[in-house]
Amino acid sequence: MRSATPKLSAAVLRAAVRIHPEQFHTEAE
């Protein structure tokens, strides 16, 4: 389960970035 957690998190982050790219760009800057 632990080894799958980072992969799931990465997938969620990628999906979130595609859904709300403006939020991530704002936070990054």
Image (cartoon, grey):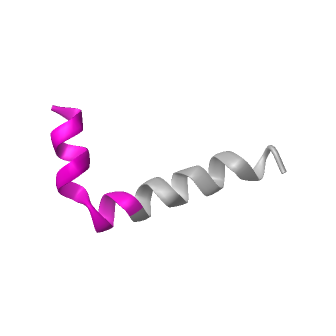
Residue occupying the point 23% across, 34% down: 28
Residue occupying the point 31% across, 65% down: 18
Q: Can you name the residue that lies furthest to the right here?
A: 1
- Whether residue 7 sits left or right of residue 14 in the image: it is right
Residue occupying the point 23% across, 57% down: 21
**Magenta run includes residue 17:** yes
Q: Specify the quadrant that holds the C terminus.
A: top left
Q: Is residue 28 above or below residue 22?
A: above
The image shows residue 27 at horizontal and vertical percentages of 23, 37
The image shows residue 10 at horizontal and vertical percentages of 53, 52
Q: Main secondary structure of the magenta part?
A: helix
Which residues fall within the magenta stretch?
16-29
**Magenta run includes residue 28:** yes
Q: How many marks?
A: 0
- Whether residue 5 sits left or right of residue 12 in the image: it is right
Residue occupying the point 78% across, 46% down: 3
Q: Is residue 14 above or below residue 6?
A: below
